[in-house]
Amino acid sequence: MKMISFYKIMSGFYDLLDVIYFRDYENSPRKAVLENINCEDRVLDLCTGTATNAIRIAQVLPKTKIVGVDISKDMLRVAKGKIRKRHIRNVKLYSMDATNTRFKDKCFDKVLLSLVLHELEEPLADAILKEAKRVLKDDGRIIVTEWEPSHTLWRKILFLPVHLLEPKSYHAFIKKDLEKYFGKFGLEVVEEEHCDYSKVLVVEKEKV
């Protein structure tokens, strides 16, 4: 209930992340995510929020089929308004629990988790990762975007609101060895790209 109330408040401000932290598109995680999507992929955007990634992919790659799910109806309301305004036809949005979706096993080429895992207590993050793996094709990829604190003074100052406002789980998550973490689920990090205030990890199922 606390998380739903939090996202109700944040839904009107969430897109400011792109204005403040990701305004340089060439160095943004949005570009890194897009570069990992093929033109006819079937993409699941788990915890899609206001559907920023989904919308950009849909606009640039109109043959992709994108599904966004989120438990917050307020976030989805903002996302649907953006989609209507841009006349986008290849994104479908659903109010759904990301730990227990209604999709078939191994039905998506790509699964996106953008600024999601750090916000959750570990059991909930684990459950979402397990669900992402379940719906991912054997040759598919999970594209994970996470915060990465900067080291320069000015960037530290600009990043301070994120550092202060994120839940306790964030401070534990940024200290994790993510390769070991994903390995617990039979997943491996195959690529990593450092972007402004963030990093994008490409994760695949471990080869048997």
Image: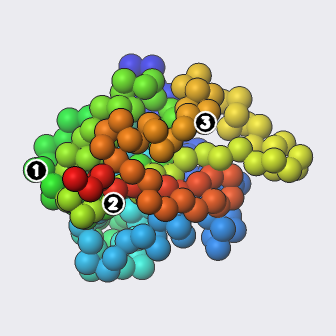
> Which residue is painted at 45% across and 24% down in the image?
121
Q: Is residue 205 left or right of residue 193?
A: left
Q: CA distance from mark 3 to mark 1?
A: 32 Å
Residue with the mark numbered 1:
104
Residue farthest toward the top in the current orientation of the protein: 1
- Residue kind at label 3, given as amino acid type: Ile
Residue 167 vs 154, above or below: the answer is above
> Which residue is painted at 60% across and 36% down in the image?
174
> Which residue is painted at 43% across and 25% down in the image?
122
Mark 3 / mark 1, whichever is N-terminal: 1
Mark 2 / mark 1, whichever is N-terminal: 1
Quarter of the image that includes the N terminus: top left
* Res. 76 in view: no
Label count reads 3
* Disc 3, SS: loop
Residue depth check, mark 2 versus mark 1: number of the one nearer the observer: 2
* Res. 58 in view: yes
Res 138 → quadrant: bottom left
